[in-house]
Structure formats: structure tokens, C-alpha cells
Image: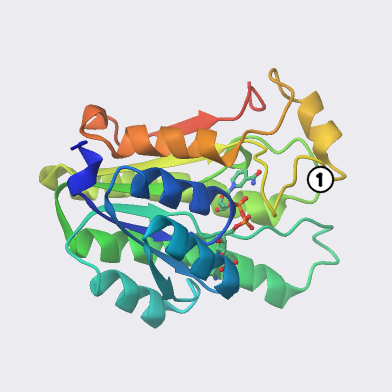
Amino acid sequence: MSEISRKNILVLGGSRGIGAAIVRRFASEGAKVAFTYFGSEAAARTLGQQSGAEIVKADSADRAAQTEAIAARGPLDILIINAGMGIVGDPLSLEPDAVDRLFDVNLRAPYHAAVEGARHMNADGRIIVIGSVHGDRIPFPGLSAYSLTKSGLQGMVRGLARDFGDRRITVNAIQPGPTDSDMNPADGPMAKAMHSFMAIKRHAHPEEIAELVAYVASPHAAMITGSMLTIDGGFGA
Ligand code: NDP
């Protein structure tokens, strides 16, 4: 039995991309895994069947639905806050409602999820939020709203690490660079430009991000807290 196999794990936003790789990574070790989804019912069902993970429909932007999903699955050992969306464009043209939705999903929801997760978490628990290297570096125009959300997570991580440290709950952000997913396909129109900023000139595979998540979730990482762990092929170097 691995250390992870005895854990109760909830992944918020697990139906596709990086979240799905995280679900698979934990499920492959026999852990009790549940994940939320909102728009991708078919993908969620398929992943649930393949991995044995429980699927839960809950819009992260709906605080009551998210709170219920978390509370009903406690006591948790590990909470992964992955659900996120991207909006790129001229801030003078972006729809304010779309920007508010971005803030709801990428910033408001992670804060409430982390707090609710801690409320229903065992000692020595783990809260991991998926940030972005764009929390540190914005080499293109059109990313200010998205980057605001990922920079905001950094303050949350630092603060909550101190709030929950007495219970030995660690709070960290993992900050991917370009990673192959529906949100940012490796063969997308911006791929070449992104690779030009990188030391390792390719998109990461979602499984590479999941591997770092698994390490930070493990007992070996008990002294890592309040940290931003960047995995970006040198994008931000
Ligand atoms: P995808 O668009 O491929 O997947 C997003 C996932 O989040 C889906 O499972 C989606 O579920 C879920 N999700 C989105 N909105 C909601 C919502 N309102 N409620 C519940 N679930 C939701 O994105 P990625 O896998 O690429 O991104 C995952 C995270 O990684 C995000 O936080 C993103 O910002 C971050 N990131 C990604 C990078 C990249 O290059 N790909 C780089 C840096 C960070 P469903 O479809 O069922 O709604």
C-alpha cells in the first residue's frame, strides 16, 4: 500500500486536462478520489468509469454548490483546486461579465474552496491550488485579467499556510507553464510564441504536472508550505 492509497482526495475541476491527469494519478494508487466538473458531463463520466473516481457536478462559481460538494466529502486528506478558465484579449474589448465570471471561477472559488476544505480536513492535510507561471510573468498582451487571478492565488497561499499551519495542513500553489490541454493545445496558434520564451521548448504533458502535485500531496512534502512551485520549462526564468 502506498502512502496515498489511504487518502481521501477531492479534485475540483477534474473532468479534463491537468485535473483529469491528477485524478488518474491518485486513482492509480488506489486512493479514494472524487472530482467535480461542470460543463463536460461525458468526459467526467468516462473518467469516472475508467478511474473508479466519484464524479460530482458542481459549478465552482456557485459557492453553495461548491461548499456542499466539499462538505459532503469530508473529512478530506487532500484538496486539489484545479478548476480554472482562461480569457485572453484586449481589456478594452473584453466583456465585463465574462471577466467577472473569470474572477469568480479562478479567484473567488479557490479562496472559498480552500477555507471550506480546511474546515473538513484532517491534520497533516494538503491544499494545493493550480496557479500559473502567469502569476509571475506576463510576456504577452491580453492576459491582465487571467494573470490577476493567478497572482491573487499567491497571496491566498501565503496567508492560508499560516492560518492552517498549527494543524500541519500545508497550502501551496503549483504554477504550470504552457501545458497541453483544451485550454492551451500544444499545436495551438500561440504555441510557437510561447516556446520562444522557454528553455525547454515544448508544452508540458498534464501527467508531468500531476507528478509534482502527487509529490506535494505526499508525506515527504510536509515542510513545503506557503510556496509557489513553478513547473514551466523555464518560461519564467
Ligand atoms: P482545461 O480547460 O483543459 O480544463 C479545465 C478543467 O476545469 C475542466 O475539467 C473543467 O471542467 C474545469 N472547470 C472549469 N470551470 C469550472 C467550473 N466553473 N466548475 C467546475 N469545474 C470547472 O484547462 P487546463 O487543464 O489547461 O487547466 C487547469 C488549470 O491549470 C486551470 O486552473 C488553469 O488556469 C491552469 N493552468 C493551465 C495551463 C495550461 O497551459 N494549460 C498553464 C498554467 C495554468 P468542465 O469542462 O467539466 O466544466
Mark 1 CB within 8 Å of ligand 1: no
Which quadrant is home to the N terminus?
top left
Quarter residue 90 falls in? bottom right
Q: Residue 96 at what x, y percent from top left?
A: 72, 74
Q: In front here: 209 or 126?
A: 209
Furthest residue toward bottom: 64
Give how far across and how far down residue 235 sits, in percent: 67, 27
The residue depicted at 21 percent of the width and 50 percent of the height is 7
Q: Say if residue 13 shows up in the picture.
A: no
In the displayed structure, does residue 39 sit left or right of residue 144? left
Q: Nearer the viewer, residue 78 or 91?
A: 78
Quadrant location of residue 97? bottom right
Q: Which residue is pictured at 47% across the width and 71% down the height?
A: 60
State the image quarter where residue 120 is shown. Answer: bottom left
Give the quadrant of the C terminus: top right
Give the residue pinned by disc 1.
Answer: 141
Q: Is residue 125 left or right of residue 123?
A: right
Number of numbered discs visible in the structure rendering: 1
Residue shown at 45%/32% (left/top)?
A: 229
Q: Residue furthest top?
A: 199
The x, y position of residue 47, in whole percent, is 49, 61
Q: Residue at x 37, y 82 (%)?
A: 64
Q: Is residue 31 left or right of residue 157?
A: left
Q: Position of residue 136 (x, y in %)?
A: 59, 36
Q: Amino acid at mark 1?
A: Pro
Tag 1's secondary structure? loop
**Residue 173 visible, this angle:** yes
